[in-house]
Amino acid sequence: MKVILIGFGIIGKGVINVIRKKREYLKNKYGMDLKVVAICDRSGAAIDDNGLDLELALKVKEETGKISKYPEKGTSMPIVEVVKSIEADAIIEATPTNIESGEPAKTYIIEGFKSGKHVITANKGPLALYFNELLSYAKKHNRIFRYEASVGGAMPIINLAKETLAGNEIIKIKGILNGTTNYILTKMEREKLDFDTVLKEAQELGIAETNPHQDISGLDTAAKIVILANSIMNMEVTIKDVNIEGITKITPEALSMANKGGYTIKLIGEVSENKLEVGPKLIPLDDPLNVKGSLNVAMLNTDLAKEVIVVGRGAGDVETSSAILSDIINIYLKNK
Amino acid sequence: MKVILIGFGIIGKGVINVIRKKREYLKNKYGMDLKVVAICDRSGAAIDDNGLDLELALKVKEETGKISKYPEKGTSMPIVEVVKSIEADAIIEATPTNIESGEPAKTYIIEGFKSGKHVITANKGPLALYFNELLSYAKKHNRIFRYEASVGGAMPIINLAKETLAGNEIIKIKGILNGTTNYILTKMEREKLDFDTVLKEAQELGIAETNPHQDISGLDTAAKIVILANSIMNMEVTIKDVNIEGITKITPEALSMANKGGYTIKLIGEVSENKLEVGPKLIPLDDPLNVKGSLNVAMLNTDLAKEVIVVGRGAGDVETSSAILSDIINIYLKNK
């Protein structure tokens, strides 16, 4: 199994670290010899058909910030050229999310399919904006398209709904799909602090991003809800179809009042046939959706299994790589 | 896709009802033409290579209690003969659980593999007693062996751990795997009633069985823990290796005291490298394992995704059929 990694930031490095650590495990358990034949970043790429030295790749990136400095096999070849010209079974697309245009990830994904490669992505942007278009490329070129990491990080949801619960129609999905806002609301509730104070602290701890707009405005959750709607519930919607409200107006007083009535407040994304919504909601304190800290949770309502709830870590480099690795293994097993 | 159903009790009827309702859905979504070519019960079988009339089969069973009374195609052929001689892709084994000997289910499963059929079972008995032996038959005859319904009913856990979380090593599994005991403890806690009163009420409502020994003694949970240990964590253990304590000594006073300290009491099954245990445990009130009513819950600790929690319905004919149907679809897709 040969893969090309596109994007060598936090997620990309996490993927390489996990592949490195799991090499023997994958060989013993699945008989899979997993080779990373190219790693790309903004500077160019490192390419080796026999498989790159992953420790060396991490070291070069750490020391120079540029994978193109990889000894002998480093190159300034543009990413699109790598995708088109380098032979591999699959690409792992892990570039930063852009939810305005979906680019450049969208182009990499399409070129991947066009050049006969399966595609794994962790990227919400292209999925939230162009899901059905991307899927049509996958079908046309008879390639597999997997994106478990794009929603909920390590929390299984897409493959859970489509494969583990195969045969069930998913009627509604409702949950907390953004760890940052859950962290902020949990902390505001427990320590009676106001929104700005907790946000600042979360930024200092690296839990919230420097630009937290997408998280706190509900946009990030909306993108994930759109991905779930299109991929699990066969809808054809975009982020424009979602009613979105963020959490910036939530006060510790509101949380305290909710608590007195037996409730908490969470930023909830919800999708059903007639509803596509993101906003703060009252959730009973003993409800399974009341999960704390930066955890993610989703409740799926289905016709046969009825309600199924799943909880997991929505972020983290190793955690997200868990979802990407399961996608790699699944593609390998389908093509063995 | 041709299947033989063995056992036409609550689960078996649930499976037939679900297949009947989902026929068009399965054709449209997976291109699968699912035919039930034989249904067996203690009286014999109904056999039709073109696929039985499922409505008629349900009606015959309802009216006479005997599938052998199915018009023209009813027979008194013993089940083992049906398994051996009737051509089919898979058998669905749904006979009553026997956790002393695993029979007669064990024989049906082995004869299924020997005659070249994939096997799906909902039956804890043979899995808890002879997992590795059954698996060796599956491997020898190169057939698929699936048993999602055996643990947790509609709550996905086995296929979740093995497929959705592929690549993760499962370090620990801990959870509530018996809905009856969860129902009893929840009711004792909420209504301050003693064990015997609640048990009697649960029996009258059909939530607890007439002979509730396996549930309340922890034996049912122990069988499920053994299945998880062997199938997910590659252990080779039997029910004799499990430390088992039931819930019969739990009092409303104990629950009330636990509540005052911020805890509840649940019958928890747990498996890790050094532990194989079933017993009542204190669980913090805001812990994800504190689920109410007859719900099941499991927390998986993994090396990459870290903790993943899943909640679902542990019983019910349609709910259990959901797990069986996902196994059927999975086998079909692997052999398409």
Image (cartoon, coloured by chain):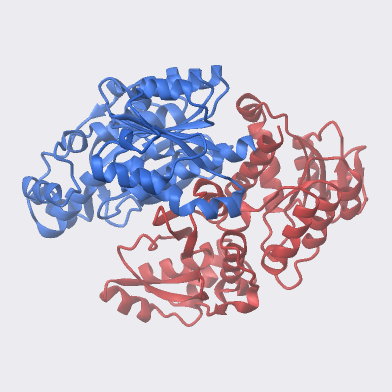
Chain colours: A blue, B red
In the figure, is residue A316 to the left or right of B14?
left
Q: Position of residue A317 (x, y in %)?
A: 33, 47
Q: In front here: A139 or B200?
A: A139
User: Which residue extends farthest bottom?
Assistant: B249
Q: Position of residue B157 (x, y in %)?
A: 53, 54
Above or below B5: residue A67 = above
Residue A165 in view of the camera: no
Identify which residue is drawn at 16% across, 34% down.
A213
Classify the position of the N terminus of chain B by image quarter: top right
Q: Position of residue B201 (x, y in %)?
A: 52, 68
Identify which residue is drawn at 36% across, 34% down.
A94
User: Which residue extends farthest front?
Assistant: A72
Q: In front here: A55 or A15?
A: A55
Q: Position of residue A330 (x, y in %)?
A: 55, 40
Quarter of the image for residue A107 reads top left
Classify the position of the C terminus of chain B by image quarter: top right
In the figure, is residue A246 to the left or right of A165?
left
Residue A316 in view of the camera: yes
Above or below B178: residue A161 = above
Identify which residue is drawn at 36% across, 81% down.
B253
Q: In front here: A211 or B150?
A: A211
